[in-house]
Image (cartoon, coloured by chain):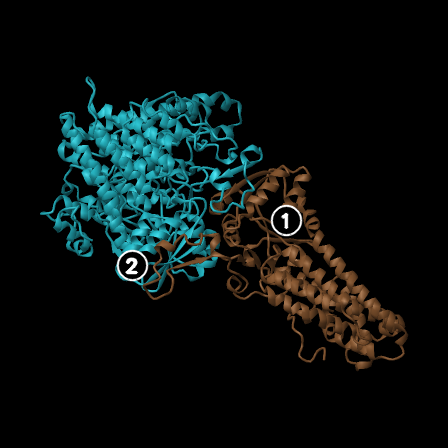
Amino acid sequence: MPDTQVLVNDFLNKLKKRKIEGSQATARQTAELLRSVISQQRVPYTNQAGALIDAVKAVGEQLIAANPVELAVGNIVRRVLHIIREEDLSLTTAAIGGLNLSAVSDDENDDDRDGDSTLSAAAVAAAARSTLRPPSLQTLLEDTPVSAAVPQTSSSGGDSEGKTADKSSRSRKLKHDVIEAVNELIQDIVTCHEQIAEQAVEHIHQNEVILTLGSSRTVLEFLFAAKEKKRSFRVFVAEGAPRYQGHLLAKELVARGLQTTLITDSAVFAMISRVNMVIVGAHAVMANGGVIAPVGMNLVALAAQKHAVPFVVLAGSHKLCPLYPHNPEVLLNELRSPSELLDFGEFSDCMDFGSGSGSPLLHVVNPAFDYVPPKLVSLFITDTGGHNPSYMYRLIADYYSADDLVVQRRATAGN
Amino acid sequence: MDSRRSSRAVIDPKVRQVGFFTSAPLPPDRTQSDPPDPIRSPPLADASSPGNSLSPVMIPPPRHPSDSLLRLPHSPSDAFPPPSPTTTTTSLGDFSDDVTAASSPPPAAARVRGRGSSVKQQGAASSFPGGGFEVPPSVKAPSSVPASGLTTVSVVKLPPGISVEVQSDRALNSKPLKEKTSKAERRAIQEAQRAAKAAAKAEGIKTPAVTALANAKSAKSTKPSPQRNDSAVVVAASEKKGGDRSVEKDRKKDVPHPRMQYDDKSRVQKLKKRSVVKPTEARNRVELFRHLPQYEHGTQLPVLQSKFFQLDTLHPAVYKVGLQYLSGDICGGNARCIAMLQAFQEAIRDYSTPPAKTLSRDLTAKISSYVSFLIDCRPLSVSMGNAIRFLKSQIAKIPISLSESEAKATLHSDIERFINEKIILADRVIVKHAVTKIRDGDVLLTYGSSSAVEMILQHAHELGKQFRVVIVDSRPKHEGKLLLRRLVRKGLSCTYTHINAISYIMHEVTRVFLGASSVLSNGTVYSRVGTACVAMVAYGFHIPVLVCCEAYKFHERVQLDSICSNELGDPDSISKVPGREDINHLDGWDKSENLQLLNLIYDATPSDYVSLIITDYGMIPPTSVPVIVREYGRGQLWIYEECDPLASPGRCSDAVFFVDGLIFYPSQHLVLSFWFPDRPPSGLNNDLLERSDNFVTVAENGNFTNFEL
């Protein structure tokens, strides 16, 4: 454990000092950290899933506290928890389902009313179905017992007798499977650009004029994918003061041979009347379909709405956050250094601190993020395809289990 | 609407006729109410036309006597059956269904329009033909059939505005009526002939094709011809009042010239030949803005400086101002305008008329050359354009009898007065109005740096109001920083942020004060780029947006977007971020073919985002801008006009604005009182005087420059 603790502390420091730029990098590093936490975690003989969950939660809690605004951290922690639960489930299902497959199929209907004896197997089977199958009406109806059943199965699975022979292999198998799945998750995070970019041709056609703000790797890949498919179009890049990442994006777009025009953020309204589509990246996508995005995005979204220009948000699945925002402009925001707007000391000559009430006359506000309400978003493009803002909650529900929405160790858990 | 309803109750109780109809049974009182007007009923529009009696409108059909009177090679339309009532009605709606109405309404309409105000003041309204039956046609026609070609023509050609009234009234007073009308008639006939000829010409071109085609189609193609003819007749009839031809011409002249389009190669070439600066065109221009001039920045200044001793035609003061524009030392609509006018003042002072030339001609040419130099340095702002227009009109007005020194003195004082009254005094009036909108505890947001807004904030602070200012700034000019510095120095509590954070900061804001470079006739506010964004977000948050703009910056142009007309700044200032050396991704951007940097200077804020425009005529909704432009925009007649306003009382009780539930009378009271401090203007009753008391107190002072707010 000590070496993971070092890793965790290191990562915590980075998060606290805001050393990690971009939600993708954060997500990837979080996943990698959790992977090592899991692999280092010694698994007890019984209730292995519970132990893993507790370990991940313990780390996850710290990580989230270190940078609550970086929602990707929480997302990944929840994803990993979800993975653990799922893997455990599928293992249990495999174990039990293999034994009494016929029984399950027979009394499926009375399961819910039956006692504990049959509940575990049937519920597990149902849960397994729900995870393995695409969502259908049946799985939706059966969804309810899943969350209740999961902790039970892990414990009951451990307690049940006559399966001790499986134990040792299963314990190793669970951890192995979870690490496999986390690896897949990391892979997903790394390659989400490509999957999103694949859809570019469907959305960008010849001679379009596209506006974007700031810099996003996803947007860059998306535009470039369309360009590779021999679409010729024109991109307006708003520079995204005060970080001026638009300069970077413009440079890279030009390097890839796209017709690019860099504009100031204030010219967005002036130019949007000639724009066919706004394509932007996001910092995080909330469960209500709202978007936390680099500052200035709300402006663009409002202008796009005024001119009936589609406002398309590209987001990898690691940006989908299962939380519903409340007052996101304030609570999910952070204020960056004023030095990005005004140089230190620039106004020292005209500020008189000797007199007056002592409160400074000058405030500088430099928020990092903007909240775009769902009604301003026309379309989300994630690695699973295009979605309406109103559908996001359902999409998000696929990735997370309801138990993990609040990442907090239960007081009773663990000990 | 009320008059319409009540009149219906009297005359038309049973049948409500909608749409186009032929009214064979005429209510008798309608013809009675129509006064036989021997002066106005023109002989050419003979009412005995049988086709006319069927038509519900006053437009004569193509076989109208006026046509036969004109008798032109107008064959194709004659060959076809005369248009059915439906075809003609499309053009004017149910104007009136009277036989005589065919001829008589137009003059009346012209009269109503001439006064441009409510029917109440019109003596004519009672005797108006069909007045008891319908709303006056002048009101009705445009509203009912706004899209028809004919109505638009007639609207354009009818003499709108008060100036018409003034002139025509005076004309009517001075000249015997009889002669007047006959002259007008002759003119009308000429006009009609001309129009008909034009129509015939158009027809002649069309005929070969038309004959080959099917009947229906050709009928369609000939339709314009009767309409055009009719419009000519309408115009002719409307000119019965006479004396307004020149005014009409003025009106036409008033339609703003199309701006120079810099994607027009030949014209650009021509321009280059004339220009002094010879700028090099920028490479990597944005395709969308080819119609705007964009030059390599930084190249003009050295060229100009080296040319200093060759530019003997240029007055040094003008030269200096040009350089200051070029380097950006003077910016902002008011500052630029004042600097230019002062330079012109100096230039006029040092001016002497060359032998064998008249002052007004030569000086106008001189000023024009100065102006084109200034345009080379930086495109004119609307404020400057208006000031130049004013100056030129003043020069043109100088009587030849005046000696040179007198003329120069007149111009000097004219310019002085323009600066004082239109800019300085206007700003003080604006400040006075705007301060009433600031309450304790307000958080006021402003964007960029507007001189008017700055004065407002400072004045409110001096009055001891407790408020906080949010200054929103944007790249690349960072004008807000300068404003911030000045306000912080004065001790105002300020918050500074970038335009990107506008939706964050807007939560705490209670009022938005914006400056404007110009307010266009459709209510669009043309201002520093980013203003539209701020107004849009404020509108989204339901926060009132108050635009502060002096009335001399109003312009009759209309604009819907920020692309058709704009100004391009230096693109290099976008690639570089001062004080942030780490952002150097775009160094050497101009070597890349695919990258363009766009530095827009202005944008157009749609009028629906603007709650209020604070101007020197009071606080008006953006929809009232065209009224201000129309009433006061024309060469600043109201300041210098040497006529007796008492002779034309129609001017006094015009345009009334309703703002904030208060009745506001535009400050023409002030103007009138200013001219006649000892005589109360007869057009104003006591009620008006009371309500506009602040202006009356001004009148008692009797002096503009000592005007205390």
Q: Nearer the viewer, residue B139 or A17?
A: A17
The Cα atoms of the two marked residues, 2 and 1, are separated by 48 Å
Count of marks placed on residues:
2
Mark sitting on residue A217:
1
Q: Position of residue B586 (x, y in %)?
A: 55, 40
Q: Nearer the viewer, residue A38 or A276?
A: A38
Q: Is residue B246 above or below residue B355?
A: below
Q: Is residue B504 above or below residue B211?
A: below
The residue sitting at 27% across, 27% down in the picture is B315
Residue B545 seen by the camera: no
Identify by letter the chain in cyan: B
Question: In the image, is A238 to the left or to the right of B121?
Answer: right
Q: Is residue B184 above or below residue A67?
A: above
Question: In the image, is A377 to the left or to the right of B228?
Answer: right
* Residue B236 quadrant: top left
Quadrant where the N terminus of chain A is found in the figure: bottom right
Residue B543 seen by the camera: yes
Q: Nearer the viewer, residue B600 or B559?
A: B600
Mark sitting on residue B461:
2
